[in-house]
Image (cartoon, rainbow, N blue to C red):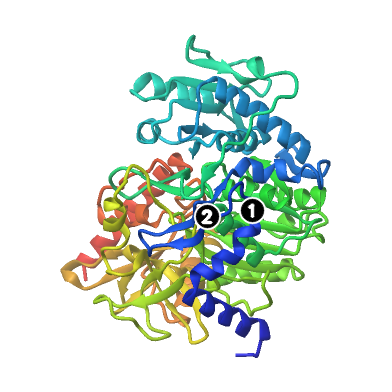
Amino acid sequence: MEEFYSFKRIKALAERASKDPAGFWAQQANLISWFRYPEKALEGNPPYERWFVGGLTNIAYNAADRHLEEFPNKVAFYWTNESLDVKAVTFRDLYLEVNRAAYVLRELGVKHGDVVSMMMPSIPEAVYFGLAVHRLGAVLAVHYTGLSDEVLAFRLQDSGSKVMVVASKGFRAGQEVRIKDMVDRVLERYQTPVEKVLVVSRGFSDFNLRGGRDLVYEDIAPKGKVYVPPEPVEANEVGTIYYTSGTTGRPKGITQTQGGYVVALNWTFKALFNLGPNDVWWTISELGWPVWPMANLYTAPVSGVTAVLFEGYVGAKPDLFARIIERFGVTHVWSSTTTLYTLKGLGSESVRGADTSSLRIILNTGEPLNVGAWQWFRENLPDVTIGDAYWMTEHLSPVAGTPYGMGEIPFRPGSAGIAFSPTQVFILDDEGRPLPPGQKGYIVLKPLTPALGKMWNDPNLERYVKTYWSRFPGYFYTGDYGYVDEDGYLYVLGRADDVLAAGGQRVGTMEVESTIGTHPAVAEVAAAGMPLPGGKGEALLAFVVLRPGYQPSDQLANDIKAYARNAGFIVDRVVFVRKLPKTKSGKIMRRLLRAVLRQEPVGDISTLDDPAAFEETRKIIEQVRDEFKRAMQGT
């Protein structure tokens, strides 16, 4: 490997930090303001640790109040949409609006420790109310638009939210998303603790109001300036609940704290981005995915950086991404993997259709970016650095990544990067024994971060320990499969449940996808296995979405199979589909492909972004499965 001073230095810093995590994080405590400085940085050991013990702070104070003296007129947020309408919000505006929102929530009875649920598009009011909840010392639970009625009802019941803040509607891909109607339906069909629904009308009136329960924010918000004192909260109090969906059973509420979590995020983005005072940061995300509040509530405004809020679907127009970069002079983009695949699928106009010269870095998150997509971005945006980071809702500082804010390191396509925080990464075999570099196994952690989540309604951590710490005692189990190379780069090959027994070896789905993704005809790909009769392993199937200009054919399928075979992967069948099943946060739901192939229950599909498209794909899979089985029986 070429000598990189920064690479060696970052590895050395991470090693020292893992040996003294308390000392390391104590040095980061000044990234936020405290009403009372912590007594100690770390008390206890994971999973029972506490961070910044005794420290009192407030997220809203850090995001708004503390910037008023230095730069009140600096733009905190630009909002835009698919039509490129624009609104600018300064830090003074942010301060005033957060206080107005907090005043109304306080009048509704919200107090320190209460849980407030929010379902909104990516609009300024979502920032105002998210921070207003924290101003009162309350807990924020964010929910996706489009959850099934049953799942949203469970989340409201589980969180104990008495107050819910919603927008009347949102807009995506040119269509209305009628949020208030969804909430009405859930509250009518299910018993929930919700007593008050606060509706941000956005100037619309075509929604129902239930007397005694529903209030329109614009009708009751104070007209003049108001001040709500920021409530001091202890650093380890729960601040945020993120719900994740399992394949079966009830969703898990993962909690993050009011203090340590914010410190960890602000250090993380210094390490990944090192944003300057004139930089503009666009996080392409729906509100219900943790990425949105991570950036737009807990990092960008806290660090005083200008951010872009985008309402809509970046693929709505071929050049929309490029035009937003040009319009706001965006320098840093944080994006889901699927959004980057969408841009690739749209063709070069998506990144060349306007002046994107301001853009310096794109940070991928969700899954490691496959080699084909990385090559496409390097060819079409040669002056833009492509970064990566691997994290999970339960560990919201990166397990591994490309810490370009700390220094230059080589990017290795297909890798998530290197460990650069105190958290240590290990690869274990089935018996829990550590494996050497290059050998594939289960990815586990010795987590040493204040962004290590816990579970809601689990006061003694019994469910948390059983879920994450019991498979490999002494380690936090990520549920992923992969390996670390000799230089410490982590390669995530897929969920452990998705690992295939194909061709006499264990193959990670992402290994296959990364190879096929470099084929010139392929926009997106997902791999899945189907058990062969008689316990003879698994057939490997590749589900392919083609790039514009290519049509499905037997010849193209055989060409893709030959392409994979040249890289060492025997693909038994290429299946062309219009769209892959994905979560609303953009992750490919391979388990749905696997379930249909194996004729198993598909489990919870509440986070599926396009149920109609999945039904279309399901029928194709069922046909292919039956054809494949008939062919196998005939041999």
Reading the chain from its start, which is encountered first: label 2 or label 1?
1
Name the residue nearer the viewer: 372 or 446.
446
Q: Residue at x 71, y 71 (%)?
A: 379
Q: Which quadrant would the C terminus be assigned to in this image?
A: bottom left
Q: Residue at x 56, y 81 (%)?
A: 11
The secondary element bearing badge 1 is classed as loop
Q: Is residue 475 left or right of residue 397?
A: left
Name the residue nearer the viewer: 46 or 333.
46
For this orientation, the residue located farthest to the top is: 211
Across and down, in percent, residue 181 comes to: 50, 22
Q: Which quadrant would the N terminus be assigned to in this image?
A: bottom right
Can I make out residue 525 in this image?
no
- The amino acid type of the residue labelled 1 equals Ile
Image height of 211 relative to 261, above or below:
above
Image height of 568 relative to 454, above or below:
below
For this orientation, the residue located farthest to the left is: 534
Across and down, in percent, residue 275 comes to: 73, 60
Across and down, in percent, residue 215 comes to: 56, 16
The secondary element bearing badge 2 is classed as helix
Q: Residue at x 49, y 59 (%)?
A: 450
- Distance from the alpha carbon under mark 2 to that under mark 1: 10 Å
Residue that mark 1 sits on: 32
For residue 260, the mark is 2
Q: Quadrant of residue 507?
A: bottom left
- Badge 2 density bin: few <14, some 14–19, many ≥20, Cα 10 Å: many
The image shows a total of numbered marks equal to 2
